[in-house]
Amino acid sequence: MTTHSNNHYFVPHGAIYPVILSLGLLILASGFIFSVATDTNKDLGYLQNLGVWMMYAGAAVITLMTFKWLSSVVSESITGQYKKWEDKSFRIGMIVFICSEVAFFAAFFGALFYMRIISVPDLASFDPLFTPYKDFLGTWPSVGPGGVVLGTEYNPGKLTPMGAWGLPAINTALLLTSGATITWAHWGLLRDNRKQLILGLFLTVALGTAFLICQAFEYHEAYTEMGLTLGSGAYGATFFMLTGFHGFHVTLGTIMLIVILLRSIKGHFSASNHFGFEGVAWYWHFVDVVWLGLFIFVYWL
Amino acid sequence: MSTTAVAHHDEHAAHPTGIMRWLTTTNHKDIGTMYLTFSLIMFLVGGCMILGIRAELFQPGLQLMKPDFFNQLIGVHALIMIFAALMPAATGFANWMIPLQIGAPDMALPRLNNWGFWLLPPSAILLTLPFTLALFGIGDGALATGWTFYPPLSIQGGIGVDFAIFAVHLLGISSVLGSINIIVTLFNMRAPGMTLMKMPMFAWGWLITAFLLIATIPVLAGAVTMLLTDRHFGTHFFDAAGGGDPILFQHLFWFFGHPEVYILLLPVWGFIPQILQTFSRKPMYGYKAQVYSFWAIGALSVVVWAHHFFTAGMPVPALLYFMYSTMAISLPLAVLFFCWIKTMWRGSMSFETPMLFTVGWIILFGIGGLTGLVLADVAADAQYHNSYFVVAHFHYTLFAGGIMGIMAGVYYWLPKMTGHMYNEKLGKLHFWLTAISFNLTFIPQFFLGLAGMPRRIPDYALQFAEFNMISSIAAFVLGLSQLIFVYNIISTIKGGKKASDQVWEGAEGLEWTLSSPPPYHSFSEQPIVK
């Protein structure tokens, strides 16, 4: 080791944002717990209002800190602190982060497959002499056999399952198109065609928003007309948790897209330096792929 | 190995001092120090909880606490020891040592690194707050389900379960951030010339650990989220009336829970061979074999989870599959044991405290591994399941295999980190007291389990009285001897004999080329590894 390389890595100055962000999460989490404490303990109803206010406060702190933190990253980026080496760190980091998101969705897909293939058919397959679920057919979609749940009676109502070829098919088309428009915007950025970049991003934001509006309609219809709710047994739980978490990710993705759209309008990003853009684009494609999984396994099959 | 990198980052010369230094720091050593300090504090907190348990179990009958409080202590003890003591200790060493070992200027994502640490104190608050709230008449204390959150008990539980769920969420975010940072650092920040197959073993151990965390922590997050919606939003994931199944939770939980064991152990397996080669004064044996074994263990660990609930009911082919795949893990583990022993073979060994801990670790962790093999046997497991045998087994793997390994690391690297030698006499005393009282605590528990004493029970039959008494007395000796450890660390930080740069005669690797303590910015210019 007689020589040293001349590489220089940018180590950012310290910031107070992460600490306050964690504090915000603590307030949000405890606020949520207080707001629902009455579910498990009737005497704790007086905590509800406090809890709700804590949630607002926590969410505000989190939003503010995220904004401040990312602003300082953006300003470090446009003042040229990040070179190739740092850029590579961000890229690997984003890939690993998306992998962890995949694992999160895998848990819910796992629950769906388990209930559909194992627990629901099992409940229908007991010996008719002994089973408490005599008339239960283990078919999918299932709301379960019903019965007494921790002391309260659960009656599985009738429901219409969500078909694949109405709104969900339109939503599939919307998301797939948005995947194409963001790639088109990327091509524009690479060729230094700012108009194409901004138009492409705008279209992507519009398609993402349209998707969310469609999903809101779909949820509204499910609750008001189809008898399909979060409490509709195995089918309702997996349907709403899977599509709900996906919708939450689309919401985050759309917010991120709006941010990079505004940044593009301000003239940020260049053909050689645009990790912020690509990170969001990767995230958007990931959300897109998850939707395809949802469309096939939740809606279609 | 003649030059020492000197920091010359002028823009960082003026970093904040006092409390702001620690709140805002992006320096890997500062963050590592915070992780290690937090870990030590939580180790003592979790230790006090279990001493309460052992005091209650000193005699049959209920003396000190109500069964519900007993259950709360057990669950929170486990969550604290796993998530707030062992994992942060390993992450603390990762922060301190990985940049030094691979010749990096810092961790790759320093601010993220800071956030990863500062998520931990809020999670510790969430875990312990229910105890305090209960004192003021709010709720009925912490989660009383054991650390595994099994429904339906966890669905019936009070606000303590909710607090634990969110604590797990924050700890999970912290672990994912830490893993992202470590993976990026190892892939992107190695000194020129240091190929993956030249990385120190500790870096390898952490790389596999980080992969496992990325794959499994989000699954745990999903599982506890389902628990939360079952509790508050009327879903039926774990409820047969709606078509769900409590066993589903066990599958999801242990899909995380089993790899978690290796998440706790792999970093230790990383620095154990480094300590062995230092004090045997010969190169480690079978570097490649160890790396491949890490990969094999990492891969196997995610496909064996159901051996944690053999007795819950499963088709016979599934039982056989999980039994054989579990037993298959012992093959790569045997390779590791062979390499560790062969590293010492015919070396000129000396037994300073880190080496004592390491040799003791090999033996005790070996017992943990062998008793695990017994538990993996489906037929035998029906007898051992949920008995004290299991408790003894996983304390041999996690206390001996985890914490005693971490202690070896502390004694090994403390002189490098502080620039002072620790008190060798006190270190050796700490080792002998720990090793003897640890065995006296847990060997009786093997017999208690074989005789049929169930775990998580505040009262027991008279026939178990003697062994429980031995175990309790030894547990208090074990707990008190950790105060020697704390004293030794604090006095080493404050002063003591100056440590040389190499510290140990046989130590090799980039971290030993820096001064002791290393400069604030270690490798501002990367060394070139040949």
Image: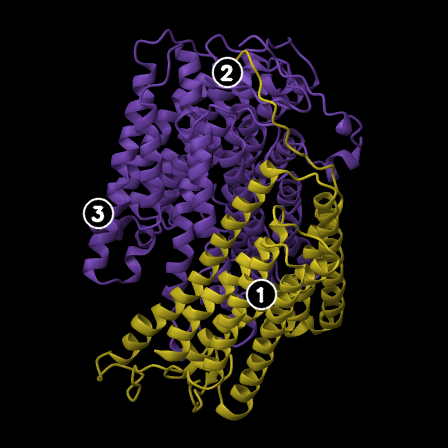
Chain colours: A yellow, B purple
User: Which residue is label 2 attached to?
Assistant: B428
Pinpoint residue A43: horizontal percent, then vertical percent.
67, 72
Q: Closer to us: mark 2 or mark 3?
A: 3
Q: Secondary structure at mark 1?
A: loop
Chain at tag 2: B
Q: Secondary structure at mark 3?
A: helix
Distance between mark 1 and mark 3 Cα atoms: 39 Å
Residue at position x 45%, y 56% from top? A103
Q: Give left or right: position of B482 versus B492.
A: left
Does residue A189 appear to the left or right of A15 in the view shown? left
Q: Quadrant of residue B468?
A: top left
Q: Relative to the observer, which residue lies in front, B245 or A4? A: A4
For disc 3, the chain is: B
Of the pair A264 and B383, the residue shown nearer to us: A264
Q: Is residue A212 left or right of residue B360?
A: right
Instruction: Classify A227 as above or below B122.
Output: below
Q: Are marks 2 and 3 in contact (CB under 8 Å)?
A: no
Circle 1/circle 3 CB separation < 8 Å: no
Q: Tell me the amino acid under the disc marked 1.
A: Gly
Q: Earlier in the sequence, mark 1 or mark 3?
A: 1
Q: Which residue is mark 3?
A: B324
Q: Nearer the viewer, residue A141 or A273?
A: A273
User: Pointer 1 and pointer 2: residues touching (CB < 8 Å)?
Assistant: no
